[in-house]
Amino acid sequence: MANSFVRYTGNGSTTAYSIPFSYRSTADLAITLAGVASTAFTLNAAGTTLTFNTAPASNVAIEIRRRTSQGTKLVDYASGSVLTENDLDTDSDQAFFMGQEAIDDANDVIKISNTNFQWDATSKRITNVADPTSAQDAATKNYLENTWLSSTNKTALTTVNSNISNINAVNSNASNINSAVSNATNINTVATNIGSVNTVATDITKVIAVANDLAEAVSEVETVADDLNEATSEIDTVATNIANVNTVGTNIANVNTVAGISSTITAVNSNSSNINSVNTNSSNITTVAGQNSNITTLAGISANITTVAGINANVTTVAGISGDVTAVANIASDVTAVENIKTNVTTVAGISSNVTSVAGVSANVTTLAPISANITTVAGVASSVTTVAGISSDVTAVANIASDVAAVENIAANVTTVAGANSNITAVAGAITNINNVGGAITNVNNVGGSIANVNTVATNIAGVNSFASQYRVSSSDPTSSLDAGDLAYNTTGNVLKFYNGSAWVTITSGGITDLAQDSTPQLGGNLDLNGSNITGTGGIPSANLTGTIAEARLPASALGSIWESKSANFTAEARKNYFIDTSSNTVSATLPSSGTAGDEIHFLDVSGTFDTNNLTVLRNSHKIQGATSDLTVATERAGFTLVYLNATQGWLLKDV
């Protein structure tokens, strides 16, 4: 039984498509292009062929489907009426068509033979085994891919397919997923506190360590708990100052280094005002550090560096400069030079709170535990730590110039000398670029010094030097500004010297002349190109003095004699030429020139008397012949004729036949 629909695939050129099923009325036909209803078509008289006004584009899905009207009965049987064959056919057709369409709607929509597509149990998707062999299957496949599946559905299916392994994993873990659903409340609680969970996960080794500790006979964790129950808890004190503890924990290696040089740090603290002074001039000190040998020279013209110590500030926050403490630790040996600052770190004893804060910094507590001896050392220099905390910004500045501080420490005596000449050094530092430039060009400076008399001469005549510089220039293109008649310019692109005549740049030819009148016997060393101009004058050119050749294209037709050429094969004819044509062995085609000028002539002559056997064909080459757009075939024995060009309307005309 035939279907109630048919599908095709557009190719961009076909407009007519067959309708292989029956239907009652054209109103029952539903035509779609790529899923969109279309009425831009006509039907033949028999109603079996549908022709689109415009050919559907390539790969467009075409569907012609019958939709029999179901709104009303087509035949109403009245009591006592006579049943006719037409009534029965109409009623039967409507019922049959509607039943067929219902079956197609239920079973079709997308129907592809199993030989072309099959279910892949491994990938859980339909796979293509072979391209459809029938036109209907191919059209249905095209309908599936380009109409039924929207771009959104295609993207979704592609996403599902690319995640099929994950979907299979979900399926194989269904019981676990169901378990997760039954524990949704707990899971939501974890999700709400995911930050804390991540923190615990990051420190899971330490969490396990705590659990193991609690299982020990003597547990450090229990010891901490006991401390928290005391009236005055050391842990509470630490928690109150947890920010500083974290900073110390992060830089514990450097803290150990600092602890080992506490006496030196004390000495630095006693000279904090001088350190502030150095920090204020850190950029100049960096410059000076690179000029050690020169500073040694300057040491002979100064007193001491106490002037530098007079530019104080306060170093406000040590806790925020942990990275800089590392830099200071790297110059511990130099810090040793700043001695005598011990006091007490009793400030540490005043830091109290509760273990809640400690719980949030478990990693730092773990870090602090093995360095209790160093913490004790820090406690012994609390006042010095307090002092350093007050000058944290300066400490940061010092850390940033750690290498320079080391350099300064190595030349301490010279620094003392430089301090007495602080204002002069600052002035020198401000001109360091110029000083370096001069130092880098010392050879040239010495050369200038050795030729100072010449330099003075140039200086005395500087106006003339400047004048020449403005009148003679060298560049890759001709100058366009500051132009005066007589200016010279060398163009490096064309490698030519030019002078400015007041309105344009003129090339100066080596050994050449600009006017033939300057030479009584001029001769040409090459071709003479008139460049569109004429040779005029009152004199004549004796024919005896003319030698060489003049290109034929340069002369008018009237100046040319008869030029004859023999041709026995296909060729392209030229204006103002005559051709002996020999067709004794084969036909010959002569192609006219691609362009013509009024008065151009071409002559043809049958020299073998065989035009009647092997014709001569004159190909028009886009021009008209005798006003017509046709080639000229000559089949007359011993024919001789001339073609003369008139214009685009008439083209080549016969003359002297």
Image: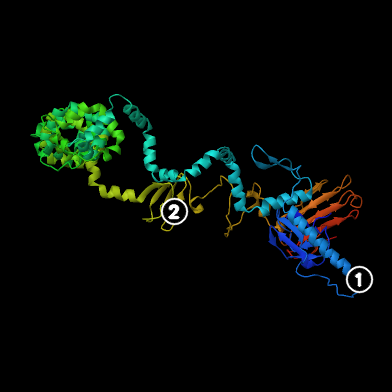
Residue visible at 25% across and 44% down in the picture: 458
Residue 85 in the image: state x and y as whole percent: 91, 68
The answer to whether 564 is drawn above or below residue 40 in the figure is: above
**Left or right relative to 322: residue 608:** right
Which SS class for mark 2?
A: strand
- According to the picture, the residue beneath numbered tag 2 turns out to be 505
The answer to whether 42 is drawn above or below residue 480 in the figure is: below
Residue nearest the viewer, comparing 255 with 560: 255
Mark-to-mark CA distance, 1 and 2: 107 Å
- According to the picture, the residue beneath numbered tag 1 turns out to be 84
The answer to whether residue 463 shows anywhere in this view is yes
Residue visible at 71% across and 51% down in the picture: 142
Q: Residues within 10 Å of mark 1 (few under 14, many from 20)?
A: few
Q: Quadrant of residue 602?
A: bottom right
Residue nearest the viewer, comparing 417 with 412: 412
Residue 55 in the image: state x and y as whole percent: 74, 59
